[in-house]
Amino acid sequence: MPLIAAALATTLSVSAVCSWNRPGVDPYRGDPAAAVEHYQDIPAAQRKILRDKLAAGQPDDKVAIGRDAVTGAWQYEAAIRDMHFGKRRMCGSVDRSKWSATRSEPAAVYCADQHCIIVPKICGNVSRITRLTPAEPARPEQVSNPPETQEPERHPLDWATGTELGLLDSPDREDEDEDEETRLLREFSFQNNAAQWAWTGDDPVQAVPEASTWAMMLAGIGIVGAWGRRSARRTART
């Protein structure tokens, strides 16, 4: 492995910082798979995954490179590093500070675990980028629902006690205000229908006969009856 890394290093001209203020001026003209092999700090298994994805054209994300950020479905660091130019040149860091604020270049991102490479469409310059671990979304605050109002258990005899009809908790009846006209009509109606209620104060009280009076009346009736029978016998003899 050290021999392969040394061989690869001899074929590259590595610079610490390069300008990328004019994308497309110096596109990468080498093999993308060979560019991936230049990243020797990536484990071999992950480099193979990256090579296979590049060959199949199956990116994990499609992003837009701007002057100050790289935006896509995932979150990324703004810095782009280890960019390949021409055939044998690689820059550790690229500068795009002179881009306009509205400039945007499309690119494809390929990842194997935490290792990601980015390939701008305009120039094909194979580079590396760091994908950030997405922040855990904030959990929505759970609002507790108010307890449901439970109806009281019904009893078979609620209908008899008035509970089922809602009489126990009904508001007390309030006396209605009665105006003068209504009061006079009510008193007039009561006076005209006094017979059905009893008597009024103006009616004379009828005297109840005493027991001796009843006895005298019965005796008189008996005498009259006896006299009548005697008269009938005399008439029959003559």
Image (cartoon, rainbow, N blue to C red):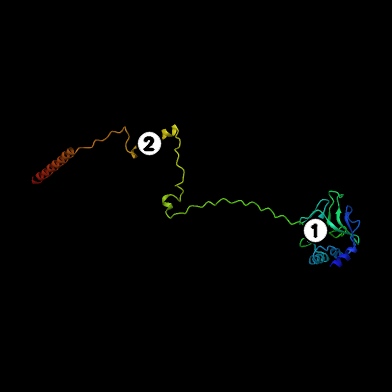
Quadrant containing the C terminus is top left
Mark 1 to mark 2 CA distance (whole Å): 97 Å
Viewer-proximal residue among 160 and 7: 7
Q: Which residue is label 1 attached to?
A: 62
Q: Which residue is label 2 attached to?
A: 190
Seen in the image, is 130 located left or right of residue 202? right
Q: Which mark, residue 106?
A: none
Where's residue 98, x and y in %? Answer: 87, 49
Three-letter residue code for mark 1: Lys
Quadrant containing the N terminus is bottom right
Determine the residue located farthest toward the left in the rendered image: 237
* Number of marks drawn: 2
How dense is the environment of label 1, judged by Cα within 10 Å: few (below 14), some, or many (20 and up)?
some
Seen in the image, is 196 located left or right of residue 131? left
Viewer-proximal residue among 137 and 238: 137
Where's residue 148, x and y in %? Answer: 54, 52
Where's residue 173, x and y in %? Answer: 45, 41
Question: In the rendered image, which quarter is residue 72 located in?
Answer: bottom right
Ranked by sequence position, the earlier of labels 1 and 2 is 1
Three-letter residue code for mark 2: Phe
Secondary structure at numbered mark 1? strand
Q: Are marks 1 and 2 in contact (CB under 8 Å)?
A: no
Secondary structure at numbered mark 2? helix
